[in-house]
Image (cartoon, rainbow, N blue to C red):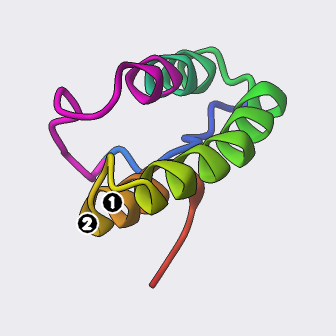
């Protein structure tokens, strides 16, 4: 099976300021990408969108964080 990038590797962004839960989700997404596990990647990226929205609404991340993470891991384009 051909390796397909599941997230946008060209986007570089320091995630160390994000809540630990999101940092762990990002690590998992990157592992799924590395293993070409698109099923688990898709499931987790869908869940992460909801988590990002929740953190944004509760002002735990910025709108910039939200947009960058959605572009990088969720395929979101604005």
Residue under the point 73% across and 47% down? 46
Measured as percent of width and height from the top left, residue 47 is found at 72, 41
Q: How many marks?
A: 2
Q: Is residue 17 one of those drawn in magenta?
A: yes
Q: Is residue 35 above or below residue 44?
A: above
Q: CA distance from mark 2 to mark 1?
A: 6 Å
* Secondary element at image label 1: helix
Q: Residue furthest front?
A: 58
Residue beneath label 1, please?
Answer: 68
The magenta segment is 10-25
Of 32 and 62, nearer the camera is 62
Q: Quadrant of the C terminus?
A: bottom left
Q: Are marks 2 and 1 in contact (CB under 8 Å)?
A: yes
Regarding mark 2 in the picture, which secondary structure is present there?
helix
- The reply, left or right, for residue 47 in relation to residue 8 is right
Report the side of 41 relative to 49 (left or right): right
> Residue 12, percent across and down?
19, 45
Instruction: Identify the residue under disc 2.
Output: 64
Q: Residues within 10 Å of mark 1 (few under 14, many from 20)?
A: some
Q: Closer to the camera, 55 or 32?
A: 55
Is 19 in front, or is 7?
19
Secondary structure predominantly adopted by residues drawn in magenta: loop
Tell me the quarter of the image containing the N terminus: top right
- Depicted 35 relative to depicted 33: above or below: above
Q: Is residue 17 above or below residue 60?
A: above
**Left or right relative to 43: residue 18:** left
């Amino acid at each position: 099976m051909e390796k397909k990038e599941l997230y946008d590797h060209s986007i570089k962004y320091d995630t160390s300021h994000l809540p630990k839960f999101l940092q762990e989700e990002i690590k998992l997404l990157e592992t799924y990408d590395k293993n070409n596990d698109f099923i688990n990647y898709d499931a987790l990226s869908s869940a992460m969108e909801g988590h990002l929205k929740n953190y944004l609404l509760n002002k735990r991340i910025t709108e910039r964080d939200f947009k960058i993470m959605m572009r990088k891991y969720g395929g979101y384009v604005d």
